[in-house]
Image (cartoon, helix red, strand yellow):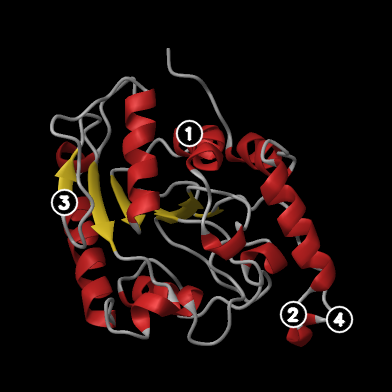
Amino acid sequence: MPRVVTLAAARDAIVTCDRCTRLRAYCRRVGVEKRRAFANETYWARPVPGFGDPNARLLLIGLAPGAHGANRTGRVFTGDGIGGSGDFLMSALHRAGFANIPTSHHPADGLELRDAFIAAAVRCAPPDNKPTPEEIAKCLPHLDAEAAALPRVGVVVGLGAIGFHAYVRLMAHRGITQRPRPAFGHGVVHRLGSGQVLIGCYHPSRQNTNTGKLTARMMDEVFRKARQYLDDGPASCTPRPGR
């Protein structure tokens, strides 16, 4: 029998996690030193849980919280500045009908995701935005718990190679292996043994969006594909029983 997991239980386990000493120390330090623009704010400075619709059929997996973004606000892809990765992502989700507004500035901004949920491979902000392989592995149970609490997910979008491969690793952890192993590529679609579809997407970081490696049109195409697979119906996307 599949284990029963709730998003509330997954969230509690995430926000109280202290498995990675380096990451916890860094997040707390950033929360004390702060950035000048946020000097009067109280930083979240804890591991960040996922956010979105509990009945979501679309799951997005990012890299990790930004030091002065989600590590400050406590919500994924939130607070990294106007035109930052959060706004770029939410604009695309809004155009695709998965978000009610095109921005993500703070937890009380009224943002709601519709049929979508955003998680991350790593739940603590890492120095230089580079978690170690060991830290990624220690965080996998959190992704496992949130994914288990989202039984309707049929399409997964990996935002960057780390988020993409975290889900591939999760499938292997559950005994669902792919041969050959899914390779990350922007817009590349893989049918998983779980019955789900996994789509690669460049991460909407400023490094990618400011250089044109990822454009709004490119991200729109990813969510067009996601919507198409979801609209194809349960036979196309719904995970098989016992996932």
Q: CA distance from mark 2 to mark 3?
A: 39 Å
Query: Which residue is identified by label 2?
Result: 35
What residue is pinned by disc 1? 144
Q: Which mark is residue 40?
A: 4
Residue 67 against residue 40 in the figure, above or below: above
What is the total number of numbered labels drawn onto the structure image?
Answer: 4
CA separation in Å, label 1 and label 2: 33 Å
Identify which residue, 11 or 115, lies in the foreground: 11
In x, y percent, where is residue 181?
19, 36
Which residue is rendered at x = 58% and y = 60% of the image? 65
Q: Please, what secondary structure does the residue beneath circle 4 have?
A: loop
Along the horizontal axis of the image, is 107 left or right of 239?
Answer: right
Task: Say which amino acid is labelled 4.
Answer: Asn
Q: Position of residue 29 (x, y in %)?
A: 79, 61
- Pick whichever of labels 1 and 3 is earlier in the sequence: 1
- Single out the mark in the foreground, 1 or 2: 2
Which sits earlier in the primary sequence, circle 4 or circle 1?
A: 4
Q: Give the Cα separation between the discs numbered 3 and 4.
A: 44 Å
Q: Which residue is mark 3?
A: 189
* Quadrant that contains the N terminus: top left
Q: Secondary structure at mark 3?
A: strand
Determine the residue positioned at 82% across, 76% down: 41
Q: Amino acid at mark 1?
A: Asp
